[in-house]
Amino acid sequence: MDIESIKSQFPIFKNKINGKSLIYLDNANSSQKPGRVIDRIYKFYSKEFSNIGRSVHTLAVTATNRFEETRDLVKKYINAKAREEIIFTKNATEGMNLVASTYGEKFINKGDEILITELEHHANYVPWHFLRQKKGAVIKFAKCNDRGEVEIDEIKKLITNKTKIIGITHLSNVTGAILPVKKIVDLAKAKKIPVLVDGCQGAPHLKLDMQELGCDFYAMSCHKMYGPTGVGILYAKKKWTEQLPPYQGGGGMIEEVKKDKITFPGSPTKYEAGTLQTAEVVGFSESIRFIQDVGIENIMQHEKEITEYGVQELKRNNSIKIIGDPRNRGSIISFIIKGIHPHDIATVLDEDGVAIRAGHHCCQILHEKMGVAATARASLGVYNSKEDIDFLSNAIKKCNKIFNK
Amino acid sequence: MDLKELYQEIILDHGKNPRNKKKCKDFNKDAEGHNPLCGDKVHIFLKLNKEKKVENISFEGEGCAISIASASIMTETIKGKEFNVAKKILEDFLNMLKEGSKLKTNSLSEDQNTTMMSLSGVKKFPMRVKCATLAWHTFLYAAEGKKETANTEKTD
């Protein structure tokens, strides 16, 4: 893979950060955008914009077509069976709230159990907590092991005849562990329990095939997939979109409105209330095309190489402790340095143009379990190279010089 | 932006060897503080006597170099001061971080003044200001007997 040619497609790298070239290692937080995505949004607003699905004039038709073409593109990209299964949301968080709210309303009652894991981002816990408060449901946490993985047996032993849904991350945003989603889905299927996958970190870095994974729901944030902010996708099996109630009410999601009665259309319309982030959705079509042009297999191979190199390099430095040692790791490396707080690490690295994240990464349950308040995290994307890792490890040496004299 | 302005020797020293970092035995007031954005936590233990003078003050907590150094410097500066004087110093300190103004108070020794000024570089790092203010807000919570946790999302 020609990294220089890929990097040159991202205008942000032409800028200097604190007078230095940008080494962007905060991709698990959000990724940068290729020029074609930015250009697509500009073109849409310049030449094709109108609100969608409402008016009959030419622009309305054009805009609606571009929007719906993106839905088809997504459907094909993730190998969904029907376009009704692709719901546009504002982000993965909204997708998971949609599932917790609608599925919870219909199927979860007092004493019913929701099974999630200790690795979950707050977005796959807090929505279930609301349900716990509202309905008296019980939330169970499958344990993660010392490697920062959740093993299938930990899920297995918590499933009871009260388990109503399983919510798991595809790829931990802290330890980098890739969970055995297919195995968990197979296990759940045998017990007729639906599975929601938080695909925030999985979607940008792994090949997506909903038929192969077999999950019932898969939530993504497009801004982590080299796409615009404000767009998320919730894949929901037709079986569920046909049964579950609408989520938010408003314009565009109704069939007929009377003073005493309202009827609703099918999915995705009933889940897409109000004017959506039209330009961003259309812009996202170029993110998918970008990923397709590079090839997701190539991206996976490349990121695996650079991540392995990164783990090796950081392990050379005795002051660094990498958090988690998953056997199947995505492109995420979280670490702590003895005697230096992660926020101080991030500030020192920033001076050299190296952008990482420090904090609990919206995973307080996991950090408490690991006995650390915060970690520093380097997360890689398609444009990162071994040189970026070298910059990172040199910048870390500078931290040691300042704080561990 | 210059790292040396942020991580001055005085701050690195207080961050590494914080003063009064323990639970003092004679405290009669205490409060906890939390910076939810980065997870910094501090617990202030305070002995305020009948004349409303800070007889003793100490802290426990975990956080970055800035938050630990700031807590350490705060305890050193406030110890022995009348509460009203301490409150003025606190206001002065917050103004220094937010507005970039110089310290106006005349109740500090030259050394104390220099030490407090060493935290002024934080102003240039807006994401880190709350690290520096946490312990100071928490001191006020303790002194005023507030029961809830001081939260930098609400105090700043």
Image (spheres, rainbow, N blue to C red):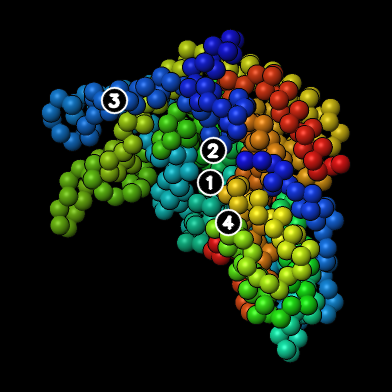
**Protein chain holding label 1:** A
Near-viewer residue (B77 or B50): B77
Residue at the image point whose x is 76% and y is 53% from the top: B11
The amino acid type of the residue labelled 3 equals Phe
Please name the residue shown 83% across and 73% down the image: B24
- Rendered position, A214 above or below A360: above
* Residue drawn at the location 15% of the way across and 53% of the way down: A258
Residue at the image point whose x is 62% and y is 68% from the top: B104
Q: Secondary structure at mark 4?
A: loop
**Quarter of the rendering containing residue A271:** top left
Which mark, residue A44? Answer: 3
Extreme residue toward the bottom, this view: B50
Q: Residues within 10 Å of mark 1 (few under 14, many from 20)?
A: some
Which circle, 4 or 1, is nearer the viewer? 4
Quadrant holding the N terminus of chain A: top right
Q: Which residue is mark 2?
A: A198
Q: Are marks 2 and 4 in contact (CB under 8 Å)?
A: no
Q: Position of residue A289 (x, y in %)?
A: 43, 17
- Measured Cα–Cα span from mark 2 to mark 1: 8 Å
Dividing the image into 4 quarters, which one contains the C terminus of chain A? top right
Q: Nearer the viewer, mark 2 or mark 1?
A: 1
Does the CB distance between marks 2 and 1 fall below 8 Å?
A: yes
Q: Chain of mark 3?
A: A
Q: Which numbered dot is residue B100?
A: 4
Callout 1, which amino acid?
A: Ala
Classify residue A338 by image quadrant: top right
Q: Is residue A220 visible?
A: yes
**Label 3 vs 2, first from the N-terminus:** 3
Label 4 is found on which chain of the structure? B
